Image (cartoon, rainbow, N blue to C red):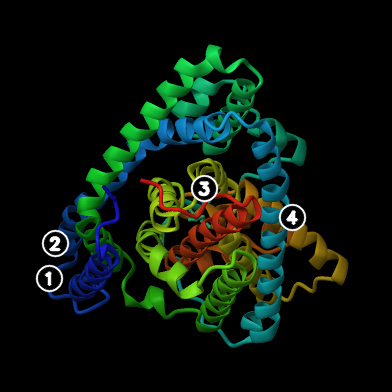
Amino acid sequence: MKILQQRLWLKILVGMALGALLGYALAPAGLAVVAENTAHHIGSWLALPGAVFLGLIGMVILPLVVCSIITGIAGSNDATFVKDLAIRLIPYFLLTSLIAVFIGLGTAHLIKPGLQNNEARAPVEIIAPETMIENPTIPERIQNIIPKNPIKAAVNLDLLQIVIASIIIGLACLAIPHATIEPFIKLCQAGQSISMKVIEWVMAIAPLAVFGMMADMAIKLGPEAFIGLGGYVLSVLLGLLTLLAFYLLIVFFVAGRNPFSFLSSVRAVQLLAFSTSSSAAVMPVTLQTAEERLNIHPDTARFVIPLGATINMDGTAMYQTAAAIFLCQFFGIDLTFTEMMLLAFTLVGASVGAPAMPSAGIVILAAIVAGLGVPPEGIGMILGVDRILDMCRTTVNVSGDLTAATVMERWLHRSNKQQS
Ligand code: ASP
């Protein structure tokens, strides 16, 4: 049975639209049909189904990532396949992130948002600025991704460490006689099926969850969050749309698929990514979409999607570039060509390291632009519009993972037949 029932995307879309309308009606900065306190009180109740939805998906993320990766690598019992996949996938991820950064540079230089006469909005408190600046050195970053304490990684839900530990365990399974590890692989397959069953149940409340989350967000942010800093928002949105168009070209020319049917297969998960702003939260649904809607072989999907959700964030890379250039233009910081190139490569690394959760992109960006001389108020300035941009870049991040899965499927000549 399929998780993504017929027209789920439409129900989610209707939920989103109704939620935004209700939020606008209740928002103190919108129609304000009720008093401010009442609006926030109603908002916290409206957000409840969304919290339940995300909480239940969150419950299975750990077993799902671990079991998917281990069965993805060791289930096929084919070391050559895994090697072939990895040597194509990692350069593919890096190359698309680099292209995303160059698209960001292009749109920011085309629109020059920071040189326009922007009225900077007062920052909206989404994340506490003091928790934002944290700038580990490169050797520290590398040390931080080694899962030296897998239990701690699991408790903290440090996805990158969990993914790396699972890959190592999967590779070890491949190196051990099949008979020895067979019970373990069966256990992982069972874990994967149980997790997917939970997701199937949870998806039933997706439209209601999205309705409530949108309403709550609209109450908190008000309509201004969607229209402030026009040129900056425009340059980010233009860049994200270009990136999406680039994916569709890849789907057509590289993966040999119809881009329109690709879009129609992935729209439900795109809408969920938009509503949740977290590619990690929707990762189970992305995986399901890859296997059931795009007919990608589980060996490919179970490796590409969890890894992609963790390290492949082209939308974030594009956004961070456009935002960094905007802030430099706004504060009159001239970047030389070399500085610009250095920034481009730093941002590719930053998007790899960014956790797949709401606001992650701006937190990492804060550390990078501080190094360029942008004052902390700069981040405060773009914080107000960040939520809506986060929703859009997460949609693109998830689309990028699904595009990568179709490409790997094609390159590795896997069967395109429907998996039961
Ligand atoms: N919210 C994004 C994601 O989960 C990360 C970001 O903030 O850019 O994909």
Estimate the x, y position of residue 277 in percent, counting from the top left: 42, 57
Residues marked 4 and 3 touching at CB (< 8 Å): no
Give me the C-alpha separation between circle 1 and circle 2. Answer: 6 Å
Instruction: Provide residue 214's location: percent of width, then percent of height.
Output: 28, 64
The crowding category of the residue bearing disc 2, from other C-alpha atoms within 10 Å (few below 14, some 14 to 19, many at least 20), is some
Residue at the disc numbered 1: 34
Describe the element under mark 4 as helix, strand or loop: helix
In the image, is 74 to the left or to the right of 146?
left
Q: As rendered, which of 197 and 225 lies closer to the eye?
A: 197
Q: Could you tell me the amino acid type at mark 3?
A: Ile
In screen coordinates, is 9 left or right of 396? Answer: left
Using the image, tell me which numbered label, if any, was put on residue 89: none
Contact (Cβ within 8 Å) of mark 1 with mark 2: yes
Q: Earlier in the sequence, mark 3 or mark 1?
A: 1
The earlier-in-sequence mark between 2 and 4 is: 2
Q: Earlier in the sequence, mark 4 or mark 3?
A: 3
Mark 4 belongs to which amino acid?
Thr
> Residue 329 versus residue 331: which sits nearer the camera?
329
Q: Secondary structure at mark 2?
A: helix
Which residue is labeled 3 in the image?
305
Between the residue at mark 3 and the residue at mark 2, the CA separation in whole angstroms equals: 41 Å
Which residue does the numbered mark 4 point to in the structure image? 346
Q: Which residue is mark 2?
A: 38
**Quadrant location of the C terminus?**
top left
Which class describes the residues within 10 Å of circle 3: few (<14), some (14-19), or many (20+)? many
